[in-house]
Amino acid sequence: MTEYRIQTPLSEEDARKLRAGDIVRIDGIVHVWRDRAYDHALMLLKQGDKLPENLQGCAHWHCGPITRKIGNNWVVISAGPTTSRRFDKLEPMAIREWGVKLIIGKGLGMGRGVTEALKSCGAVYLSAVGGAASYYGRKIKKVRNVHWLELGMPEALWVFEVEDFGPLEVTMDSYGQNLYIDTRKQVDKNLLKIYRTLDKNIDATGLL
Amino acid sequence: MVNTSFVSEEFMASAAAILLETAATRFPQFYVKIIEDALKRESHPGARARLEKMLAAVFYAEKDGRPICQDTGLPIYFVTIGEHARVKGDIQLSLNRGTEKATKKVPLRENVVHPLTCKNPGTNVGWKMPYIVYDYKPGVDYIEITAITRGDGEDMATTTVKIPSTGPRLLNIKKGILEVIFHARWACPPHVVGVCIGANVTIANQIALKAVYRIPTGSRNPDPMVAQLEEELLSTINSLGIGPGALGGATTALALHIELAGCHTISPALVVAPGCWTTGRFAKGRLYNDGSFESLTHPEIKVA
């Protein structure tokens, strides 16, 4: 386990140094978008428009923040990760075509399409603690930009300037390692053992 | 103290705003303690680090007045009307005003949108929201309001399990509860699990939701048979190895509350509501006819 302090945008070479179990703290820019913004981005691209941000080497945080406008500036009140599996269909494209190198989220990591994209492009998935939004909110120093506010506060595309953003844990790396799957294997064994204690005649096939 | 002989709209609106703000930003002390106790028992290094981060979030939320979790949910209130309470005015309108005020002040996330057009008024009010679940209590002269901020994830994890009409009933119920917890790994464990065994599916969902918010969190059902089942299942769930954030450890549930209800002769409904670790985002207060207020979750709060 190694601890890294990394700067965005991140190169493929640096992303490939990160291994499952490593701890990462980010300085620089983090891009925040989720459900509605994904739909909106796809619509724009279909029309032949460009995305308003260069996402090459970026950190894509799955999050719908609480923000407040004070004068002309936005400030972040609370911001924590949302469940990443909702973006299983769209994230491979963001990695392969838009250049996302770090994904930050929570839940159970992401599916096979993302695993393959992380491997072929050299990118990683980082886990934040779900619910700890008051903690991460303090690490956001400035709101650099916001697009598509008409989608609503949680659904806009936010560009945050962060300092010492973390600790985040590498839970899926570019070599196919996935800490959620490792934990799941142990949980499967424990659950079968519990079922057998409850009923020694239990038919264990198809239980999991 | 407001010197009146009834519970006014203004009183209800102020109380709702303060309860909702408190719910989003400060756990009750008894709730903080169950996380601290879990940390004392936990030996998995990653799980310890995650529990410590959760406690840090609780600390900074209270210190800065920030919501603990950014998903401040749909605004939902439980309102219990006492037999001798005299309410003057519209409870729904009062709670609308309180919700709008707290949304601006804290601020809360602007979550409530139109279900088809996604139009967001930015107030968390509209289209039946905030939603009020009413109850009645004989012999008392107050109304009781509980504000809960319940994220979408924790609510989506709520699951109805079909219990077969034949076969070993208790075994099937235990298996059902374990399966729901297994599938809710994404929903920010450690959980506070609310369970209803009985009634029908429609009613059991509401009873399970209320069970999540039992006070104090982690207390036992007064029925010794149910209390024993709660203890057994809590310890079984914590031997699954799911852990905080589903990355391993001995802390998968902080508490488990089971409620029974009479059911149809065929079979009971089983509803399991695995609230996330920020289930402590609720605040409850009593509004008396004489204008006084007391909170059952946060004794320090006052309503001016």
Image: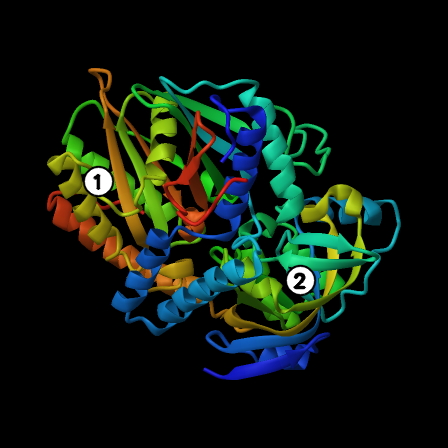
Residue B133 located left or right of residue B230: right
Q: In this view, does B235 lie above or below B137?
A: below
Looking at the picture, tell me which residue is in the foreground, B139 or A26.
B139
- Residue at (68, 29) in percent of width and height: B114
- In the rendered image, residue A196, in percent from the top left (x then y), is placed at 15, 49
Residue at the extreme front of the image, as rendered:
B3
Q: Is residue B49 above or below residue B121?
A: below
Residue B235 located left or right of residue B298: left
Residue B242 seen by the camera: no
Question: Which of the chains bears the disc numbered 2?
Answer: A
Residue B200 seen by the camera: yes
- The kind of secondary structure element at disc 1 is helix
Q: Write down the residue under mark 2.
A: A60
Q: How many labels does the image show?
A: 2
Question: Which of the chains bears the disc numbered 1?
Answer: B
Residue B80 located left or right of residue B97: left
Q: Are marks 1 and 2 on the same chain?
A: no
- In the rendered image, residue B189, in percent from the top left (x then y), is placed at 39, 54
Residue at the extreme right of the image, as rendered:
A48
Is the image coloured rainbow, by chain, by secondary structure, or in one colour? rainbow
Label 2 is placed on what type of residue?
His
Label 1 is placed on what type of residue?
Lys
Assess disc 1: are there few (<14), some (14-19) or many (≥20) residues with their C-alpha within 10 Å of its C-alpha: some
- The kind of secondary structure element at disc 2 is strand
- Residue at (24, 16) in percent of width and height: B264
- Image quadrant where one finds the N terminus of chain A: bottom left
The answer to whether the residue labelled 1 contacts the one labelled 2, judged by CB atoms less than 8 Å apart, is: no
- Residue at (23, 57) in percent of width and height: B239
Assess disc 2: are there few (<14), some (14-19) or many (≥20) residues with their C-alpha within 10 Å of its C-alpha: many
Q: Write down the residue under mark 1.
A: B174
- In the rendered image, residue B16, in percent from the top left (x then y), is placed at 53, 35
Looking at the picture, tell me which residue is in the foreground, A156 or B255.
B255
